[in-house]
Image: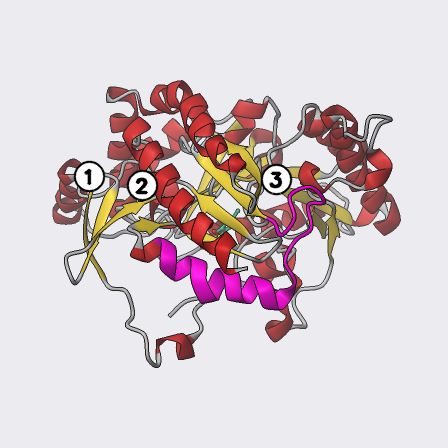
């Protein structure tokens, strides 16, 4: 299995999920779970939608497969136009992949290739943030900022460098004001400026791109402080570095907008996306690039020598079109924007528990950081974290009928990313189940 300690199933039974309906899934024993992670940040419209299944079946019957290698097919064309229409500014060029890691990989290759064509061949390096996850292929893993995930596969692709992320809960003490708090704008400015420092340290003539998620997932949902992305944009313009918005999680309604960049009002040069583009009814990813980045490829014999057999698979692009038709018909994004305050408010009730240090996120995307000591923000050591997350929480939450993720790639967090169709009754159910399990967890420490 993927990212799984195989030995943990020497004695325990592998959970087998057999069906889903709306925000719920059922296992092989008939037990019901609230899918508070949308599968894996994927299931925007929830499970069991026959309209999406029918769109897939219809396309498979009409044209099951044709590649996008010098050919096209109607649903890829229509979907590309739709994405270009929604993407901010001049992001008008769509390159389909089979998933998120491939989109990230494609974006790095595009950035390198672009700078070679515009006469800056040394620009190839990538800056990304500490603890950020960008995928598992060797390029995407190299951009990932989680040393533990990379160690078994080193040496990876050279030329990637890390800067601090936007975890204001653990902002450096030197940014604290006289009252002991950190002004989010001061923090945002500092965090963005670290990108300029990294570019200067590496030599601006060697840096091609900065890869940032709108809200960083790994570490437990770090939204951007006010002004952060505006400052990053200035820095990228100053040094001619491409800003890649990795929206594999944050696009397609997760934050109440088609794209995270739209929510926070910044203009990327490239967006990478996947997951919710089809609500999980078929695999698909999309890299969306600006006209400026596309331009050097538009002449003579130039070719982007890159592609994937299943990138823009007809069944997947047909499903994505249906997915977006439903978004419009059922006002899904409007629903997220209307309900996100209620979601936040419901989760914030958990702050009365001593083990809950922070509740953070935006839209339908939240992280709950668990701490040993709330007053000092002391976190758990490796052993405690192992016992808490793997030894207790993951199983206890699941046994309680809540599918979500207990993650300690950074400090220990619980991650929530429910289907966008969820409402107050689901928020309450999450809060109640989390409260019961976290209360028990605190008692075990
Ligand atoms: C921000 C980000 N980028 C890239 C990826 C990789 O996507 P995939 O697993 O589809 O290759 C992920 C997956 O979770 C992600 O969250």
Instruction: Say whether residue 259 is left or right of residue 81.
Output: right
Q: Which residue is mark 3?
A: 244
Q: Quadrant of the N terminus?
A: bottom left
Q: Are marks 3 and 1 in contact (CB under 8 Å)?
A: no
Looking at the picture, tell me which residue is in the foreground, 167 or 375.
Answer: 375
- Residue sitting at x 87%, y 49%: 201
The answer for how far apart the CA atoms under marks 3 and 1 are is 30 Å
User: Which badge, 3 or 1, comes first in the chain's sequence?
Assistant: 1
Q: Nearer the viewer, residue 156 or 17?
A: 17
| Residue, disc 2 | 278
* Residue 54 placement (x, y as % from top left): 13, 41
Q: Of the two numbered discs 2 and 1 on the same chain, state the one appearing first in sequence.
A: 1
Q: Earlier in the sequence, mark 3 or mark 2?
A: 3
How many residues crowd mark 2 within 10 Å: few (<14), some (14–19), many (20+)?
many
Q: Is residue 378 magenta?
A: yes
The residue singled out by tag 1 in the image is: 52
Residue 120 shows up from this direction: yes
Left or right, residue 322 beside residue 307: left
Residue 356, above or below 323:
below
Mark 3, residues whose alpha carbon is within 10 Å: few (<14), some, or many (≥20)? many
Is the residue under label 2 in contact with that under label 3 (CB below 8 Å)? Answer: no
């Amino acid at each position: 299995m993927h990212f799984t300690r195989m030995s943990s199933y020497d004695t325990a039974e592998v959970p087998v999920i057999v069906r889903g309906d709306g925000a719920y899934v059922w296992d092989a024993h008939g037990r019901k779970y609230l899918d508070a992670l949308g599968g894996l940040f994927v299931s925007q419209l929830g499970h069991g939608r026959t309209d999406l299944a029918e769109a897939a079946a219809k396309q498979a019957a009409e044209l099951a497969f044709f590649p996008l290698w010098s050919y096209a097919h109607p649903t890829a064309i229509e979907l590309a136009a739709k994405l270009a229409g929604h993407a901010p500014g001049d992001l008008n060029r769509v390159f389909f992949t089979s998933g998120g890691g491939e989109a990230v990989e494609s974006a790095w290759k595009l950035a390198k290739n672009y700078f070679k064509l515009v006469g800056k061949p040394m620009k190839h390096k990538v800056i990304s943030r500490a603890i950020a996850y960008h995928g598992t292929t060797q390029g995407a893993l190299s951009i990932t900022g989680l040393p533990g995930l990379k160690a078994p596969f080193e040496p990876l692709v050279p030329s990637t460098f890390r800067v601090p992320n936007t975890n204001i809960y653990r902002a450096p003490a030197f940014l604290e004001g006289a009252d002991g708090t950190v002004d989010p704008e001061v923090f945002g400015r500092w965090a963005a400026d670290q990108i300029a420092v990294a570019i200067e340290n590496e030599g601006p003539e060697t840096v091609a791109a900065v890869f940032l998620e709108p809200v960083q997932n790994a570490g437990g949902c770090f939204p951007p402080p006010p002004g952060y992305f505006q400052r990053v944009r200035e820095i990228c313009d100053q040094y001619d570095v491409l800003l890649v918005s990795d929206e594999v999680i944050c696009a397609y309604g997760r934050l109440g907008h088609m794209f995270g960049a739209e929510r926070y009002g910044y203009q990327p040069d490239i967006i990478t996306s996947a997951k919710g583009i089809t609500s999980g009814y078929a695999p698909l990813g999309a890299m969306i690039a600006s006209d400026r980045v596309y331009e050097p490829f538009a002449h003579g014999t130039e070719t982007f020598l890159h592609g994937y057999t299943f990138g823009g698979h007809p069944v997947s692009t047909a499903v994505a079109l249906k997915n977006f038709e439903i978004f419009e018909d059922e006002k899904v994004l409007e629903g997220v924007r209307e309900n996100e305050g209620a979601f936040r408010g419901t989760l914030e009730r958990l702050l009365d528990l001593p083990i809950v240090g922070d509740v953070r996120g935006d839209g339908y995307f939240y992280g709950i950081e668990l701490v040993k000591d709330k007053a000092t923000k002391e976190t758990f050591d490796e052993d405690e974290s192992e016992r808490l997350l793997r030894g207790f929480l993951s199983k206890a939450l699941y046994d309680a009928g809540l599918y979500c993720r207990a993650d300690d790639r950074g400090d220990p967090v619980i991650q929530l990313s429910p289907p966008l169709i969820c409402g107050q009754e689901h928020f309450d159910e999450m809060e109640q189940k989390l409260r019961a399990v976290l209360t028990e967890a605190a008692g075990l420490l």
